[in-house]
Image: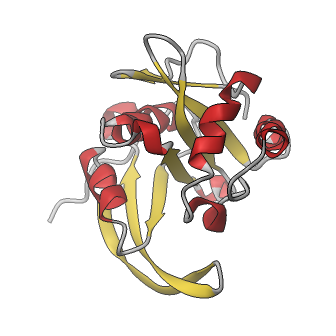
Amino acid sequence: MAMSASVALAYGGVVLRPFEDADVEMLRDLATDPYLPLIGSLPANATRQEALEFIARQHQRLATGVGYSFCVADRSDGSALGTAGLWVAGLAEGRATAGYAVAPFARHRGVARQALSALTAFGWTIPELFRVELYIEPWNTGSIRVAEAAGYLREGLLRSHQPIGDRRADMLLYATVRPPDQGGEPPIPG
């Protein structure tokens, strides 16, 4: 799972890059969103030290086989805007799961859609990968719009799919498959 240095991780106005210690303030802003600590490893209202520990964990994701974790940054100045990850537990079956989060100060500017598009394009550079999935709670209309704008299709509702906080949550399954011009299977006629 080595990431090629020649892979372009930019899309529109964002670039996906490794996390840096300078990203701490963005992460602290992200940690003010009450939902994110329920679905990730960044603690609620993270301290500077907790944000640095989060960064250290992200640097280990590839080495431990979990996947690829990126900082979403502004393409023009490199400032941190959010996070994006491609989690590869299902890679042996040709699948990965994508995730993204945008800091509150950077929302409603198309950052999430651009980050997901860049992450998906990166995914197609992994020869074993043929399908990228997203799991989105039905109430999360913003994330649904992002998925659809990035070319993902809704495939169904997974009832009581996973624990989030103190409850089991239904999740919408969105997915995209490798395009035929990038080594994917052509659509089945009919």
Residue situated in front as seen by the camera: 56 or 116: 56
Judged left or right of residue 155, residue 74 is right
Quadrant holding the N terminus? top right
In which quadrant will I find the C terminus?
A: bottom left
The x and y percentages for residue 109 are 30, 35
What residue is rendered at 70% in x and 45% in y? 67
185 horizontally vs 49: left or right = left
Considering depth in this image, is 184 or 85 the residue closer to the camera?
A: 85
Quarter of image, res 24: top right
> Residue 40: image x %, image y %?
67, 59
Using residue 3 as the reference point, say whether residue 115 is left or right of it.
left
Say which quarter of the image contains residue 76: top left
Indicate the colouring scheme: secondary structure
**Is residue 141 visible to us here?**
yes
Which residue is rendered at x = 54% and y = 15% of the image?
Answer: 78
- The number of callouts visible is 0
Q: Is residue 4 above or below residue 24?
A: above
